[in-house]
């Protein structure tokens, strides 16, 4: 169990460092900035790389919503759920701290920029309201878990699961970065919010509630859709 939790910490750290780091450090660089497409790819690549690095150790959840969705789908034991969530959040905080430490070395850096935090209303990249943001996070997480549950099913091709899951996360970011800056992952949202404080913390509830709802719905529905797990 300790090895599993260590792997989850490292993996979630990498997801936040790679994904949020690309948004903070590289997305807006003049002339060579990677933009939304680059950030979306960065998040997808963190999952692809970790899937093959630690998937055989911990399952490579990297996300409380994924753990909860797998639990709801009958794929993950209740006894391991809370430890996974706690260590994923810890990894997310560590990743956000690494991004902060790097970014703060640039003259003029200001946490008011958000450190890639998620938000709605005036803190949504496209100005989307609470309702749109809630719907987006539920649907994106729902579809993410449907892909995960399908790609890791015993009748699927396990060697390609990491690629399918990483590409789905890239697509999710392409759709929803303008709406919420894309969460679908409470650990990814919690890390930056703790450093930004203020509005990021006050809006953090959405990025726990909506992804967990989407994940549970996906777990229950996929369990009905494909019951031949045994």
Image: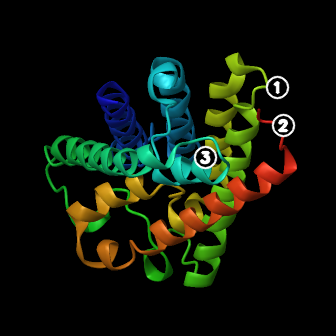
Is 162 situated above or below 137?
Answer: above
Q: Is residue 104 left or right of residue 87?
A: left
- The residue labelled by disc 1 is 155
Identify the image quadrant of residue 168.
top right
- The residue labelled by disc 3 is 70
In-front residue for pair 39/226: 226
In-front residue for pair 19/76: 76
Determine contact: label 2, label 1, CB under 8 Å.
yes
Look at 32% across and 38% down and name the residue there.
13
In-front residue for pair 198/12: 12
Label 2 vs label 1, nearer the camera: 2
Q: Position of residue 198 (x, y in %)?
A: 24, 77
Determine contact: label 3, label 2, CB under 8 Å.
no
Label 3 vs label 2, nearer the camera: 2
- The residue labelled by disc 2 is 228
Is 64 situated above or below 132?
Answer: above
Look at the image and tell me whether residue 168 can be seen: yes
Task: Indicate which disc, 2 or 1, sits on the residue closer to the N terminus.
Answer: 1
């Amino acid at each position: 169990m300790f090895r599993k939790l260590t792997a989850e910490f490292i993996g979630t750290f990498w997801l936040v460092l790679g994904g949020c780091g690309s948004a903070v450090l590289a997305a807006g660089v003049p002339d060579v900035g990677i933009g939304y497409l680059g950030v979306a790819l960065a998040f997808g690549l963190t999952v692809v790389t970790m899937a093959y690095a630690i998937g055989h150790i911990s399952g490579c959840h990297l996300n409380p919503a994924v753990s909860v969705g797998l639990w709801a789908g009958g794929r993950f034991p209740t006894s391991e759920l809370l430890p996974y969530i706690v260590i994923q959040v810890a990894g997310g905080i560590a990743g956000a701290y690494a991004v902060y430490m790097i970014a703060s070395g640039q003259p003029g850096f200001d946490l008011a920029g958000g450190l890639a935090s998620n938000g709605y209303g005036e803190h949504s990249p496209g100005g989307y309201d609470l309702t749109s943001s809630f719907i987006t996070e539920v649907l994106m997480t729902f579809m993410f878990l449907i892909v995960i549950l399908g790609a890791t099913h015993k009748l699927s091709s396990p060697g390609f699961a990491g690629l399918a899951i990483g590409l789905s996360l890239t697509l999710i970011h392409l759709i929803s970065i303008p709406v919420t800056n894309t969460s679908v992952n409470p650990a990814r949202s919690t890390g930056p919010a703790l450093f930004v404080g203020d509005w990021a913390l006050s809006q953090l509830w959405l990025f726990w509630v909506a992804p967990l709802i989407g994940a549970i719905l996906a777990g229950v529905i996929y369990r009905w859709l494909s019951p031949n797990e045994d």
